[in-house]
Image (cartoon, coloured by chain):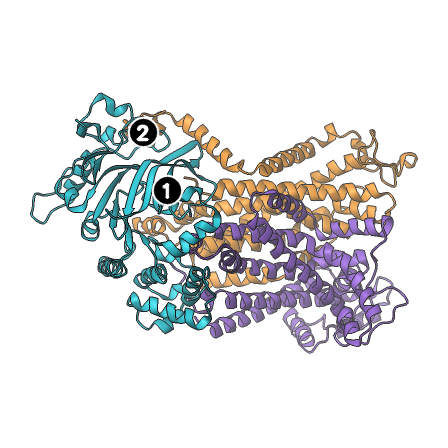
Chain colours: A orange, B cyan, C purple
Amino acid sequence: MRNSNQPNNSIAISLVRPKSIFWHNLGKNWYKFSRNPLSIIGLVIVLVIIISAIFAPWITPYPEHAGPFVDFKSAGQPPSLQHLCGTDNIGRDIFSRIIFAFRDALIMAVVVLALAVPLGVLLGLIAGQLQNTWIDIVIMRITDVFLGIPSLILALAIAVVLKPTLMNAMIAISVTWWAWYTRLVYGMASSIRNEYFVIAADLIGASKFHILFREILPNCLSPVFTKIALDVGWVILIGAALGFLGLGAQPPTPALGQMVSDGANNITFWWMTVFPALAIVLAIMSFNLMSDGLRDMLETRME
Amino acid sequence: MENILLDIKDLHICYRVYGGYLKILNSVYLMVREGERVGLVGESGCGKTTIMKSIPQILPPGDFLITKGEIYYKGKDILKMNFSEIQRLRSREIAMTFQDPTAALNPVFTIGTQIGDVIKCSTALEENVHQEKIKTLSIKALKEVYLPDPERMLVNYPFQLSGGMKQRVCIAMSISSPRNLIIADEPGTSLDVTIQDQIMRLLNEIVKKKKTSLLLITHSLGVAKEMTDRIYVMYAGTIVETAPSNILFNNPVHPYTKGLLASVPKLSGGGISRGIPGRIPDYLNPPQGCRFQPRCEQESPICSEKPPQLFEIEKDHLVACYLTQR
Amino acid sequence: MKLSSFLLKRLLHSIFVIFGLSIVIFIIARVVPGDPARLALGPRAPEEVVQRLRQEMYLDKPLPEQYFYWIKGVLSGDFGRSSFTKRAVSEDIKESFSATMELVIFAGILMVIFAVLLGILAARYKDTWVDNLIRTLSYFGVAIPAFVAAIIFMLLFGCYWPILPVLGRLSPGISLPTKITGLLTLDSLIEGNFVAFWDAFKHLILPSVALSLGPLFQEARIARSSMVENMRKEFLFAERGYGISERVIMFKYLLKPSLIPMVSVMGLDLAALFSAAFLVEMIFNWPGISRYGTNVMLHKDLNGISAVTIVLGAVFVVVNVIVDIIVAFLDPRIRLGANRGI
């Protein structure tokens, strides 16, 4: 390593060898992420879920069971080597259906967050930047109203009023979700706004646009990313709750909540309930763990 | 010859980070006698606070490792003490004041509660004191640090006080019961200069009045000269020189001490010196030999091979430098 | 800003939120689904009946006027008639609310006690097997949503291991205590009817545990991390350095600052219990407002839906205000208006 005789000038080094700094930072970030071995487990499970959901038609043993398929001969079989999670009351392989169900669940999470997060973050930034103006007050009051409504209830109310489809369920959940990001970003933006580097940028004459997106936003992002990772799990949960009540994707499309509800109706086939339920729990847990690791990586300061 | 109160021998402390261990303290020797005022001087980041916190064993556990050395207090090694002995040490023998008084006070409890608990725990080992007596003792302690209106102070919360008042409260907590050694970590550094002056005078007065020993940690040479009988100069986790105060200032021997004293601008003119070129070493991979060697003007081959030991050149004046050991 | 003005501001804010909430619900209920009158009466009702209902519901008037009539009704306690139960919605709600209250209170108590207990244990024995066990359980427990836990309990205790009752509030055959608070456990205790009390209590256990499981572990984690973070704070080392005994430090100086962030979370979770109860009440056949709400939602009973949503929304807001008051009480910095800008 460096001899202490030489000046401690890592900037000079980074100009000369940028690639090694990248790996160094990656290594440092990985070290931070992996402080808790559970985060690694979470990450692994999340990757497994995502990959198997993407490649579902190719890797599941019975891909056709995810569609209209009936086979009463093999209905109600407990878990075995052929059917890892057993079959349901009309003969479909539960394991395959779970993996396909994850597809929809993940798509739902992606869509909902893709709708809710940019909207929420943008509103929070604007409100935070224009603090104490009427725009701020209006935005934050509306946010408070939406935060005051329990998500599940509002999502239910909307989904019920619209026709029960996957798309409508996604809309319903997005409507309830954006407010959390607004509040999160608002809190951070309004405190960062008073930091010296923002004031300095303002004095130099940077445009409001620049200040908002190049100075303030990057500093708000860490908790946002952590929350996104966490929220994937929770959106899957609310999707499952809606599905349990029959809203959201309709049969025969497999959906986790729907499968749990079917299981509750056929309670003697315990595997029909237990495995989809475990799948939900696994999804939430792994996203939680991964998000913990993300938080360790993004929000801690070392040295 | 007065009795030795505190004797740190050959202390090595490491701190774990990504990439290895920071070898913060390297062979530290420090001694405080009864009734003596000792100063510990050094730049920011040279390990002074680490030494201070290791004495009553309040280093954050887990990441700090004491790899070698002993800390003797009244003849017993602190590092080998069991929990109740350390408790006793903290509540009856040694007291500390912290650099940042805001961080040192619990924000959700009143001053009265905090001082009261300090008193309760320090005398709890002897008898059960009741509320009235604790209150009286708290007020007495607050009066001794010249805090106005002590009764009202008892029900205040830390955030309602100014920095100077908080520092006084911390000092009051240290003297609320008789102690043998007070360790003061840069008292007044986080306050403005006039308040700092008052705090220093206060400390001086208390130490004289109660005949406690004082270990004063500071980065200001002027403060050290005024307030101490003997000084230790520290660089990068090692003690480089120690001498009685007047001897140190009149006759510094170690190159670092010389450079340090030369850097202080004097009222008698002469401008500002060049300072000491170079930077503090990388604690992750410190130099094999003398830690000051990379910045030292003089040099000899043995300087980069082995760290020099403290060598007594006259009574109470020790230097860690090969060049003076002729 | 002093405490009284803080409270006042908070109250006004809550009232505003409830009103905003009512507007949102109203918009959803009226604007979206086509013809509410038709929906209420069904496709086979004759047109004149539907027309008359339309006039009754002021559907031919402009929207803001409709809102005005609706709000007037709500404020005087009239939520209209339910097309599902065919009764006044306010009656339905009054009946079912106490059941949910009992459930939520019980679950809340479980949540608070165990969260604090587990958090303290995990922080005290940090990095030992106790801590690791609690943390592993928490990671798992947080991920178990209430309705999943409920289903699993239903499976376990309904089919395989019937030691605890899974349906309803009281076993058939046990006489109901006279209604004082509406909380069966309390009422039967007041009466001295221990048989009923024990029975009601047993019925409470499973749904409350299912409800409180997830939030409990989440709060335990927060309690633990809050305590661990405060453990590294300078003032604790200072207090230790002054000689304060470990026990006092643990239970007094560490606990109070750590509990403060916890209380807000606990309050939010308590409010969220109402919404989590939706599915749990369905599964356990618990006759509370959430089961009623789910039923009216599935039957597209607009009056019922809007009523339930606004009542629960109001409860949410009220709980939040109470939590804020408690936090302000605990944290002297908020109470005395400390300048937090440092």
Number of marks drawn: 2
For the question of whether residue B272 can be seen, the reply is: yes
Chain ID at mark 1: B
For the question of whether residue A161 can be seen, the reply is: no
Towards the viewer: C164 or C313: C164
The residue under label 2 is which amino acid type?
Answer: Ala
User: Counting other residues with Cα less than 10 Å from the Cα at mark 1, is it few (<14), some (14-19), or many (20 or more)?
Assistant: many
Give x and y (percent) for residue A132. Answer: 43, 63
Kindly identify the residue that appears in the image at 73 percent across and 40 percent down.
A101
User: Residue pushed farthest front?
Assistant: B1
Kindly identify the residue that appears in the image at 62 percent across and 38 percent down.
A42
**Element type at marker 1?**
strand
**Quarter assignment of residue B291:** top left
Chain ID at mark 2: A
Query: What residue is disc 1 on?
Result: B71
Along the horizontal axis of the image, is A278 left or right of B255? right
Along the horizontal axis of the image, is B260 left or right of B91? left
**Element type at marker 2?**
helix
Give x and y (percent) for residue B166. Answer: 34, 62
Vertically, is C17 above or below B208?
A: below
User: Residue pushed farthest right?
Assistant: A73
Q: CA distance from mark 1 to mark 2?
A: 43 Å
Along the horizontal axis of the image, is C213 left or right of C340? right
Along the horizontal axis of the image, is A29 left or right of C276? left
The numbered mark at residue A12 is: 2
Nearest to the eye among marks 1 and 2: give it.
1
The residue under label 1 is which amino acid type?
Answer: Ile
Kindly identify the residue that appears in the image at 33 percent across and 32 percent down.
B282
**Quarter assignment of residue C94:** bottom right
